[in-house]
Each structure stands twice: as C-alpha cells, then as structure tokens.
Image (cartoon, rainbow, N blue to C red):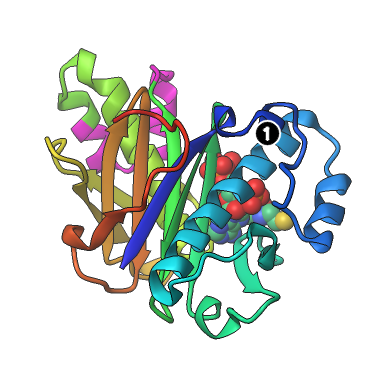
Amino acid sequence: MLYWLIQTLADHPALARAEPPEGLLSSVEEARFRSLTREKRRRDWLLGRWTAKHLAAYYLEQVTGRRPALNDILITTDPDGAPRLQSQNGYAFIIDRLAISISHSRDHAFCALIAAPGYAPGADIEYVEPRDPGFVTDFFTDVEIARVHHAPPSAQPLLTTVIWSAKEAALKSLRRGLTVDTRQIVCLPDEPATDGWAPVLVRCHPELNAYVHHGWWRQMGGFVLTLAVGPSINAVDSVTEARRIGDGVSP
Ligand SMILES: CC(C)(COP(=O)(O)OP(=O)(O)OC[C@H]1O[C@@H](n2cnc3c(N)ncnc32)[C@H](O)[C@@H]1OP(=O)(O)O)[C@@H](O)C(=O)NCCC(=O)NCCS
C-alpha cells in the first residue's frame, strides 16, 4: 500500500519562520537542522520532515491504534541523500518495513510512504509553468519529445512538467536521483484522471539495469504530483490518500 500526504508552510506558523515546530525534531535531527545555513533550505527541510512524520504517524496509528509523538519518529539521511525512517521508542518492528520519499516545491512538501519490505517509493512535486523548448530537447527522450510536440501548445507546459516530474520520482524510487542521464528513463503519462491518479508508463534503458513497475500522476492546485514504485505493487487502486492534516492544497 502506498500512502501520500501534501503539506504547506501554512500548516504551522513556525514553519514559515524556518523554526522547528515544538515536538517535531529529535535531538539528532535538531543538530542536523542547525547545520543547515540557508533559510530556504531550512524551511524546505523542516516542511519535508513535518510532512513525512505526520504521514508516518498516521500510518502507525492505523496499524497500532496509538499515535506516536512526532519526535519518536526519526528521519535520517542515507549517504546518497535518500531519507530513511527510524524509531526511537518501540515502533522499530514496524518502521523498519517502511520506506519514504520526500519532495519540496514552492512552500509545499509532498511525501510518499510504502509499507512493504523491498519496495521503494519515489515522490515528486513540481509547479506547472512554461519551460524553455531547450529543456525538452536536452532532457527528454525522442518519444517524449514527440509526445510534447504533438500536444496542443496550451497543453505543453503541463505535459512537460508531468514527464519531468515522473522522471524525478522514478529516479528517486531507484535511489539514483539526477546522478544519471534523465534520457535513460522514458515516462509516458496517460490522460488526466477525473477522480485522482492517472498511470504513467515508466521504462528504464537497459544500461540502468533497473525496473520501475508503476508510476502515477495527478494535478493539485497549480502543481503536478508524481509517484513511482519499483518493484511491483498493485496498480492505481493501491494509492490511498492519507488523512489530510491542516489546510493543505485543495484538489
Ligand atoms: C534526488 C534529487 C533528484 C531531488 O531533486 P530536487 O528536485 O532538487 O528536490 P526535491 O525537493 O524533489 O527532492 C529532494 C529530496 O529528495 C530526497 N533525495 C535526495 N537524494 C535522493 C536519492 N538519491 N534517492 C532518493 N531520494 C533522494 C531527499 O529526501 C531530499 O529532501 P531532503 O534533503 O530535504 O530530505 C536530487 O537531489 C539529486 O539528483 N540528487 C543526486 C544525488 C545527490 O546529489 N545526493 C546528495 C548527496 S548528500
């Protein structure tokens, strides 16, 4: 099962001030936060932790019937930059089976959590805006370029954003990030779904020696959200919206 949550800086007054909301961080995380120097990075980092911890707490409450304190859930960073969930007060047996992904854009954070050992989620959020035509030719494969060029001009900014975001989500699910050429992954989105998530076909170049089984996308406000999972879980009906917390973006 894949869970997701989106939150904004407006969801807690401390977040906009780039200060940790009380009870959010463990002492280890507090030290990491203090090491970040740029204010925008501090805000993004905090909002990502805020969102990911609420999502994990929601999941743990569903499974155990008890909601953990946010600072009992730790989010550490692996050497490649990927986030890892840990627990310091008795939830380790569940948390060890969870994997998360975090993305930020324009004062929003989007997180995904998967509760199946061996499966990794990739989440990405991007604001929809026109991009330079060179962006598509530089970063997209021939089939993606053709897809964008055949779309009506008014639809191209959305389509370009979905393809780009799906590549980022897929590369996060593979733990590669932008360390690899984005043309080694082909992402072809379905038409938008009227009621939520639409599939994205994701194919990896053989040189990547990797496989992403599923991708999805949707719009929310002025943003595109994408999710990827590798390897297999069941298709789009396994995407569940976690309980909304605070005043997030309205669909
Ligand atoms: C992963 C990556 C594509 C994200 O790009 P982005 O669009 O700038 O940023 P997003 O907000 O969507 O995502 C950032 C989040 O991706 C996650 N992330 C970073 N590297 C990751 C990786 N290799 N695999 C999976 N997730 C990763 C982190 O949670 C990060 O947020 P956080 O640092 O606040 O925890 C980009 O950071 C990248 O290519 N990294 C390459 C590897 C790298 O430079 N690692 C840093 C080593 S410390």
What kind of element bears circle 1? Answer: helix
What residue is at 72 percent from the left and 36 percent from the top?
Answer: 41
| Residue type indicated by callout 1 | Leu
What residue is at 87 percent from the left and 47 percent from the top?
Answer: 35
Residue 229 spot, x, y in % from top left: 35, 64
* Residue 130 lies within the magenta run: yes
Bounds of the magenta segment: 129-147
- The quadrant holding residue 148 is top left
162 or 89: which is nearer to us? 89
Q: In the visual, does 100 lie left or right of 207?
A: right
- The quadrant holding residue 10 is top right
Q: Which residue is mark 1?
A: 15
Image height of 164 relative to 235, above or below: above
What residue is at 54 percent from the left and 86 percent from the top?
Answer: 93
Image height of 150 relative to 178, above or below: above
Answer yes or no: is residue 210 visible: yes
65 or 48: which is nearer to us? 65
Q: Main secondary structure of the magenta part?
A: helix
* Residue 191 lies within the magenta run: no
Location of the C terminus by quadrant is top left
Image height of 231 relative to 113, above or below: below
Residue 168 spot, x, y in % from top left: 45, 48
Location of the N terminus by quadrant is bottom left
Answer yes or no: is residue 77 visible: no
Q: CB of residue at label 1: within 8 Å of ligand 1? A: no
Q: In the visual, does 149 lie left or right of 92?
A: left
Residue 52 spot, x, y in % from top left: 54, 54
What residue is at 84 percent from the left and 61 percent from the top?
Answer: 27
Residue farthest toward the front in the current orientation of the protein: 66
Q: In the visual, does 166 lie left or right of 58?
A: left
- The quadrant holding residue 194 is top left
Residue 114 spot, x, y in % from top left: 40, 67
